[in-house]
């Protein structure tokens, strides 16, 4: 991924100095190992702050929604795809945005690293070739990177953004990943087992709404959880309430979710939130042969009505 | 330990529809337990948390005066879940009351001085309490001249028409009621409250101004108040904020390090000038 | 006390208390109610959620009621007389409890629920021999071996815990544990050395003490336009924070009506939204400013101390790596002012 870093900076510099954009949204070095943080650059001299690596995990399309400035944005495949969805849904004005597409070789999952370290603190991490080196007080580990890549990246086919204006670095060929391999476990469960599985998972939820707030598709001005007239469901962390929250959110992003995995990465309680989304994504693929965020023109199946839809669910 | 979160049940004795739009009603309450009334010793300008059981709780300014014996009154505008539930209640319904909360108007400081009360729209409720308190025979001597300026969009939106009638007939109050635009058969003043205030120009000599109204009205009133010579220390404003607990714990009604619910809702203009502009 | 005596300690405590202690769940650690024989984890960095939830749960019933034909029957909350023991609470979190105590018991009205529970709580803390890189307790007036908010403090001296009594409540508890051995002079010295080493090991230092004054008059500073930008407005920081304690109150019905309070967050857009639709804090900028000002200016003005204990949870868990240390340090050292000309 590093080979793209310089190209991203060049592209950003060019866009800013030619006044094609007011602002570049990108990633800069974070304050912890394996972390980067979103940054907003409006001066050419600040461009060297931009980094590009396996820790650039924020989906930056979130920062484009409802903005009036002309913005350049550094985008991975999943960022670009959610930009496409939001553009189609008229939340992002395409003409105001210059997408600096960048190749992605998969993000590092901090949680997988944390699990591996069993409570020991990570002080330094370096990623080179296909290896990740983890250092802390009294330990130093060199491990294969692939074991620590985010699950969403393992099944991602679009490591090169399908939509971009400028491309930085070298394109990665489309991967023939088995997109839905991680739903297999879920599908193998009986409905009773699935219920238990979701109950156990969602019982941990503290309703901090990090999953909603990092989700590029959760842009409703007033989310249904915040509505008071009427109050749709309870605000507590009782399972019945958290379950409604997550299920309705899943329905709401069905057919739109690009599986960027931001929800799972954001969850402080380690809930694998994308599991539910992934299943809906698979249904969309099987039923309508539709993958969200690949085009700016194609009307999503849940966004249109056809007289000859089978509608067997109404029976 | 005393538990300030438990409301006292009180029955609605009387409901008065206050305005033409019928979205403002005054509820007269009688506590189920007379002891609760004794404990509910309030000052003009304070508020209480009102429970509509089955809906929730919200803060409402006290519209009756401490001189009104045996009952308390709250004037409620229908805005959210709780106020809608209150509006749907009938006479006899039991609701809950917690309070009184807040600091109230500076009655001590007002004694022996002229009082200018300025209110606009729905925010007149606690000012009505104050006016009735001052006009009460046991109190009137303690205050000097009383001027009331009260404005509403149109005559139908004026609250407490029955009180306005009574006050008009007294000679110990200068009552100035205004509406935004002229309508047939209106014999009172016409114009926005700030303009009327400027026109009337009540003297600021030995006077205290008490103001309550929508933010936009306040913004235009303050320059006039300064022009008339009211000092920031002698100008009091009653604020509104989203509140839940009423006792400075839930954390949402602060302006800077002050909580509107417990340090307010009444602040001097001087205090407000020193506080962040976040209200 | 020998370390292997921990189960015995739990057993003794459970006789009179509901005991809460850190329990490992997958890769996270939580304070949970334990019983004799429970596996507890005292070898942890710090719990994912703070132990504030034992005294200030995310959902708490204030009272229940029945709506009857001719009135309402209010069933007051049960008297909160149950004794609670918090075993293994870290010094930062114990300090947080004492800050919460200060706040909840201030003013004309005490917060009945918190104050009652706090009164009935005994803290048997665990000093931190090895602070981690995001710990900044020493910058907030605390220390890895800090005793504020503790009744007893366990100090890990290899195979034993040295137990220091801090309060009368602690003394009384120790009296009930006659099997505890007397500490040797060497143990006390060892603990003192460890405390000193631990304090030095807190490498993250910020100017936590000067920030309050700096923030005076900074309400309208352009820095707020900058720092909030990457914040997405979720509640991770405030919900994991051991001191954040804003709440919402509402009525809910299951079999009975109940008035509950639930955690709320100043970072949520509807936190200050008024019924009229007006919102005095309409964007992330005002909400971020509120969080920083509350912790480092408003609270210190009202209660004399920062409303942050430097536990580092918000630093570690923020989805976009918003680091409160950078902001505080930036304000204290004028970096933000300079950045904005």
Image: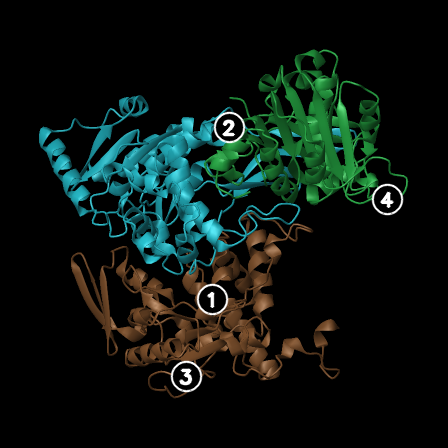
Chain colours: A brown, B green, C cyan
In the picture of the structure, the residue carrying the numbered disc 4 is B183
In the picture of the structure, the residue carrying the numbered disc 3 is A166
| Label disc, if present, on residue C112 of the rendered structure | 2
Which mark's residue is nearer the viewer, 4 or 1? 4
Q: Give how far apart the Cα atoms at labels 3 and 4 are.
A: 64 Å
* Residue projecting furthest to the right: B185
Picture quadrant where residue A195 is located: bottom right
Task: Tell me if residue B32 can be seen.
Answer: no
| Label disc, if present, on residue A63 of the rendered structure | 1
The tag earlier along the polypeptide, 3 or 1, is: 1
Subunit bearing disc 2: C
Q: Nearer the viewer, residue A110 or C109?
A: C109
> Are the residues at dot 2 and dot 4 in contact (C-beta closer than 8 Å)?
no
Left or right placement of residue B218 versus residue C205 in this view: right
Q: Position of residue B46 (x, y in %)?
A: 62, 27
Q: Is residue A59 above or below residue B267?
A: below
Picture quadrant where residue B28 is located: top right
Q: Give how far apart the Cα atoms at labels 2 and 3 are.
A: 61 Å
Q: Kindly indicate whether the residues beneath marks 3 and 4 are on one polypeptide chain.
A: no
Q: Quadrant of the N terminus of chain A?
A: bottom left
Q: Give how far apart the Cα atoms at labels 1 and 2 are.
A: 42 Å
Q: Give how far apart the Cα atoms at labels 2 and 4 are.
A: 54 Å
Q: Give how far apart the Cα atoms at labels 3 and 1 are.
A: 19 Å
Q: Nearer the viewer, residue A101 or A271?
A: A101
Q: Position of residue A281 (x, y in %)?
A: 54, 75
């Amino acid at each position: 991924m590093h080979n793209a870093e310089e190209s991203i900076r060049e592209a950003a510099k060019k866009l800013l100095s030619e006044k094609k954009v007011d602002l570049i949204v990108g990633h800069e070095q974070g304050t912890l190992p394996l972390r980067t943080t979103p940054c907003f650059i409006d001066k050419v001299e600040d461009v060297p702050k931009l980094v590009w690596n396996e820790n650039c995990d924020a989906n930056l399309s979130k920062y484009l929604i409802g903005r009036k400035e002309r913005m350049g944005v550094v985008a991975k495949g999943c960022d670009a795809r959610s930009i496409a969805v939001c553009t189609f849904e008229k939340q992002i004005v395409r003409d105001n945005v210059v997408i600096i597409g960048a190749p992605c070789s998969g993000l590092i999952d901090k949680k997988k690293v944390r699990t591996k370290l069993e409570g020991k603190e990570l002080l330094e991490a370096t990623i080179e070739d296909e290896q990740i080196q983890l250092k802390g007080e009294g330990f130093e580990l060199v491990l294969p990177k692939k074991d620590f890549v985010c699950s969403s990246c393992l099944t991602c086919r679009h490591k090169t953004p399908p939509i971009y204006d400028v491309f930085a670095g070298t394109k990665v060929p489309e991967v023939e990943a088995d997109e839905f391999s991680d739903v297999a476990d879920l599908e193998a469960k009986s409905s009773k087992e699935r219920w238990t599985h979701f109950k156990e998972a969602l019982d941990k939820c503290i309703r901090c709404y990090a999953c909603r707030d990092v989700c590029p598709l959760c842009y409703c001005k007033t989310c249904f959880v915040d509505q008071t007239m009427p109050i749709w469901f309870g605000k507590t962390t009782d399972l019945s309430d958290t379950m409604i929250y997550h299920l309705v959110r899943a329905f709401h992003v069905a057919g739109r979710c690009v599986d960027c995995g931001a929800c799972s990465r954001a969850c402080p309680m380690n809930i694998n939130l994308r599991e539910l989304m992934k299943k809906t994504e698979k249904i969309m693929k099987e039923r309508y042969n539709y993958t969200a965020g690949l085009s700016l023109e194609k009307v999503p199946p849940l966004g249109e009505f056809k007289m000859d839809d089978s509608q067997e669910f109404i029976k | 330990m005393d538990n300030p979160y438990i409301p006292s049940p009180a029955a609605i004795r009387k409901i008065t529809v206050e305005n033409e739009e019928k979205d403002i009603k005054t509820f007269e309450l009688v506590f189920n337990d007379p002891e609760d009334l004794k404990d509910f010793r309030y000052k003009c300008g304070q508020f209480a948390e009102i429970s509509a059981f089955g809906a929730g709780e919200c803060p409402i300014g006290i519209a009756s005066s401490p001189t009104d014996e045996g009952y308390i009154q709250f004037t409620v505008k229908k805005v959210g879940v709780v106020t809608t539930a209150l509006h749907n209640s009938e006479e006899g319904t039991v609701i809950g009351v917690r309070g009184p909360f807040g600091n109230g108007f500076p009655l001590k400081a007002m004694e022996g001085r002229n009082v200018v009360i300025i209110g606009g729209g729905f925010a007149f409720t606690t000012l009505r309490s104050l006016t009735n308190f001052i006009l009460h025979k046991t109190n009137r001597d303690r205050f000097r001249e009383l001027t009331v300026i009260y404005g509403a969009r149109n005559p139908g939106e004026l609250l407490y028409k029955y009180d306005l009638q009574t006050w008009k007939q007294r000679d110990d109050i200068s009552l100035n009621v205004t509406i935004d635009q002229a309508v047939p058969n209106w014999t009172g003043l016409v114009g926005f409250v700030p303009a009327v205030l400027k026109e009337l120009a009540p003297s600021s000599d030995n006077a205290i101004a008490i103001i309550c109204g929508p933010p936009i009205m306040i913004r235009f009133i303050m320059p006039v108040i300064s022009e008339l010579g009211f000092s920031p220390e002698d100008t009091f404003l009653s604020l509104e904020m989203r509140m839940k607990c009423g006792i400075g714990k839930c954390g949402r009604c602060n302006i800077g390090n002050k909580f509107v619910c417990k340090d307010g809702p009444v602040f001097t203009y001087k205090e407000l000038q020193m506080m962040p502009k976040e209200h | 006390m020998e370390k292997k005596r921990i189960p015995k300690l739990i057993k003794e405590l459970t006789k009179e208390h509901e005991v809460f202690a850190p329990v490992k769940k997958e890769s996270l650690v939580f304070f949970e109610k334990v019983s004799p024989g429970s596996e507890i984890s005292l070898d942890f960095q710090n719990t994912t959620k703070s132990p504030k939830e034992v005294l200030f749960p995310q959902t708490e019933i204030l009272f229940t009621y029945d709506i009857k034909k001719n009135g309402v029957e209010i069933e007051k909350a049960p008297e909160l007389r149950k004794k609670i023991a918090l075993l293994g609470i870290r010094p930062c979190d114990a300090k947080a409890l004492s800050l919460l105590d200060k706040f909840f018991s201030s003013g004309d009205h005490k917060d009945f629920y918190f104050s009652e529970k706090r009164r009935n709580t005994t803290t048997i803390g665990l000093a931190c021999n090895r602070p981690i890189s995001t710990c900044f307790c020493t910058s907030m007036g605390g220390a890895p071996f800090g005793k504020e908010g503790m009744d007893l403090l366990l100090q890990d001296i290899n195979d034993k815990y040295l137990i220091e009594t801090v309060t009368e409540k602690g003394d009384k508890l120790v009296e009930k544990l006659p099997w505890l051995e007397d500490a040797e002079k060497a143990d006390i010295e060892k603990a003192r050395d460890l405390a000193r080493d631990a304090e030095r090991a807190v490498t993250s230092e910020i100017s936590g003490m000067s920030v309050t004054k700096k923030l005076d008059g900074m309400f309208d500073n352009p820095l707020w336009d900058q720092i909030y930008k990457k914040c997405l407005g979720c509640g991770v920081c405030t919900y994991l924070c051991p001191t954040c304690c804003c709440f919402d109150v509402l009525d809910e019905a299951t079999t009975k009506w109940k008035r509950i309070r639930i955690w709320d967050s100043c970072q949520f857009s509807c936190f200050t939204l008024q019924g009229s639709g007006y919102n005095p804090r309409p964007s992330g900028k005002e909400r971020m400013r509120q969080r920083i000002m509350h912790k480092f200016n408003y609270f210190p003005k009202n209660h004399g101390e920062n409303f942050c204990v430097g536990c580092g949870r918000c630093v570690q868990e923020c989805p976009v790596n918003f680091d409160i240390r950078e902001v505080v340090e930036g304000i204290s050292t004028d970096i933000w002012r300079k950045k904005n000309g």
